[in-house]
């Protein structure tokens, strides 16, 4: 997982904590867990991102159209690839809210680029 900044957006810099002792690319701290109540009228998602940021989105079933950004397509966006030092282009999607910021992501093959953008 690489953290990047997006052209044309107010991005917030972040950096992965690394793999630690694991072979996987996400690292030792990363997880995501949806919690669905027995009647399926409440869904809460929480976890920890590869940069160590904990997040929680409570009852997304009750969110109004303006608040619910998850799954929205931002479109084709140029971004800085910190590993290669070059610029790439990809389709970013809103994966969730982290505080007041949107977590957006683009994936290709086994590579994932994440960014925070100010809402």
Image: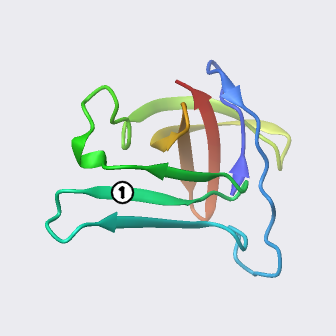
Farthest-out residue, top: 8
Name the residue: 23% across, 42% down: 62
The percent coordinates of residue 49 (x first, y second) are: 63, 57
The percent coordinates of residue 40 (x first, y second) are: 17, 63
Instruction: Please say if 111 is above or below 62.
Output: below
Dividing the picture into quadrants, the one containing residue 118 is top right
The percent coordinates of residue 70 (x first, y second) are: 38, 42
Q: Residues within 10 Å of mark 1 (few under 14, many from 20)?
A: some
Name the residue: 83% across, 50% down: 83
* Residue assigned mark 1: 44
Q: Would residue 49 be found to the left or right of residue 100 on screen?
A: right
Instruction: Please say if 86 is above or below 38.
Output: above
Instruction: Please say if 111 is above or below 24.
Output: above
Name the residue: 76% across, 35% down: 13
Say how the picture is coloured.
Answer: rainbow
The percent coordinates of residue 115 (x first, y second) are: 64, 39
Please state, as top left, top right, bottom left or bottom right, where the N terminus lies in the image: bottom right
Q: Secondary structure at mark 1?
A: strand
Dividing the picture into quadrants, the one containing residue 42 is bottom left
């Amino acid at each position: 997982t690489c953290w990047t900044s997006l052209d044309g957006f107010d991005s917030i810099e972040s950096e992965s904590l690394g793999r630690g002792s694991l072979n996987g690319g996400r690292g030792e701290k990363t997880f995501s867990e949806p919690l669905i109540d027995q009647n399926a009228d409440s869904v809460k998602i929480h976890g920890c991102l590869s940069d160590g940021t904990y997040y929680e989105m409570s009852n997304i079933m009750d969110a109004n159209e303006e608040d619910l950004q998850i799954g929205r397509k931002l479109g084709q966006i140029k971004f800085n690839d910190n590993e290669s030092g070059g610029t790439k282009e990809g389709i970013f999607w809103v994966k969730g809210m982290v505080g007041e910021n949107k977590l957006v992501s683009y994936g290709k093959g086994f590579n994932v680029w994440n960014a925070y953008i100010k809402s």
